[in-house]
Amino acid sequence: MPQAILVIDDEKAIRKTLAEILGFEGFTIDEAEDGEAGAKKLRENNYDCILCDIKMPRMDGLEVLEIARAHKPDIPFILISGHGNIETAVEAVKKGAFDYISKPPDLNRLLITIRNAMDKKSLVAETKQLRRRISKSTEMIGSSAGIKQINQTIEKVAPTDARVLITGENGVGKELVARRIYELSNRTSAPFIEVNCAAIPSELIESELFGHEKGSFTSAIKQRIGKFEQAHGGTLFLDEIGDMSLEAQAKVLRALQEGKITRIGGEKEIKVDVRVIAATNKNLMQEVEEKKFRLDLYHRLSVIVIHVPALNDRRDDIPALTDHFLKEISQEYNQPQKQIDSDAVKALQQYNWTGNIRELRNVVERLIILSDKKITKKDVEQYIFLK
């Protein structure tokens, strides 16, 4: 999609010249004949860059700049003037202009400035998106008895190096608990490394966890550093550990007992200082009885056990969770937070949440996209069952 530039200048010849040159470069150009018209257009439309004259009737370029900073602060604003001086340029930059160019503009410099401005706009947008992702709270949302107990346990266990086993159905937020423990621990200066044991084929899980040396098997074309080594000094989260093979379980047990690992195909023992947090949706004691899970590994992992209840068992938390997701998803979409009426929330509380928190978030996102300004009970009834 072509990038859009708004050209604001009271001289028609200047607007026409800039429109022709920038149009030839592949930009989409919109024009405004004075400051007031330009201010109206920038309020109503989205642009990737604004070129604005300073001396204009009714409203000068610096006033337009102030309006742009108030309404569209991320759009790069370039001032162009034949009456400027150093003081004007300094004032423009102080007020938030990306750059100041004198008339008649050097076209090469103008094009370079526009490209740099747009590159900066893209970087700012990417940075904001990354910050939103990073800054997402890992706190367990809700005030039910079960969640209060989990938060209290996390606060007690996090500063220690005790191993934790997190249990619960799929989608209840086991990873969230693990990350919260990590964030409140004394290991935050080192990595949080996650391994989904259910997603890795059994023949590759040992290489994933412990690494391998070059040539140790057919496809080992170079040395690989395993997750235990990557997490040295930090936290290793073994998600869905109930799906790990018995052979890999034995090696994990040894790593926990001795604090050492050996890469596949290697002979050297490597010391690792890792706090292990494990999670499972299975009943591990039943798995032990069926000889699918090692009892000694279970005891090593379960110094502290945290059970995360299903969403159906904590329906009182649904209003708070819904509000949290409305805010979070609206920020991701860079739009005002959509409101939801009380009857709609009650309808959400009555639904059978087989997918737990993950399903609730998906439903809230769907409602944000498909509903009008306010989410109603009718919207919930219409859109909740879409699969």
Image (spheres, rainbow, N blue to C red):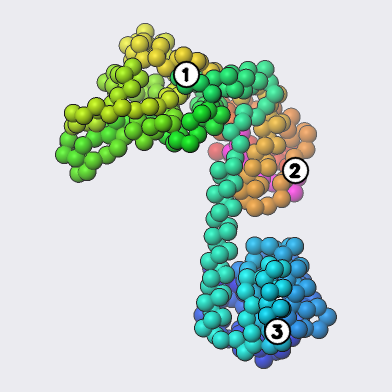
Marks 1, 2: nearer the viewer: 1
Question: Which residue carries the number 3 mark?
Answer: 84
Q: Give the SS element for disc 3.
A: loop
Three-letter residue code for mark 2: Gln
Is disc 2 placed on a helix, strand or loop?
A: strand
Q: CA distance from mark 3 to mark 2?
A: 48 Å
- Please name the residue shown 43% across and 31% down the image: 234
- The residue most toward the bottom is 13
The dominant secondary structure in magenta is: helix
Closer-to-camera residue (160/323): 160
Picture residue at 36% right of the left edge, 10% below the top: 295
Q: Which residue is mark 1?
A: 162
Give how far across and how far down residue 12 sits, in percent.
Answer: 70, 89
The residue pinned by badge 2 equals 339
Any part of residue 78 in sight: yes
Q: Nearer the viewer, residue 165 or 323?
A: 165
Disc 2 crowd rating (10 Å Cα; few below 14, some 14-19, many 20+) is some
Res. 208 mark? none
Is residue 6 visible in this depiction of the protein?
no
Who's the residue at 69% across and 83% down the image?
A: 85
Q: Is residue 5 above or below residue 160?
A: below
- Quarter of the image with the C terminus in it: top right
Q: Is residue 100 above or below residue 223?
A: below
Gap in angstroms between the C-alphas marked 1 and 2:
42 Å
In primary-sequence order, the first of circles 1 and 3 is 3
Q: Amino acid at mark 1?
A: Ala
Query: How many callouts does the rendering have?
Result: 3
Q: Secondary structure at mark 1?
A: loop
198 lies above or below 309: below
Asked whether the beta carbons under mark 3 and mark 2 sit within 8 Å of each other, the answer is no
Q: Is residue 275 magenta?
A: no
Magenta stretch bounds:
360-374
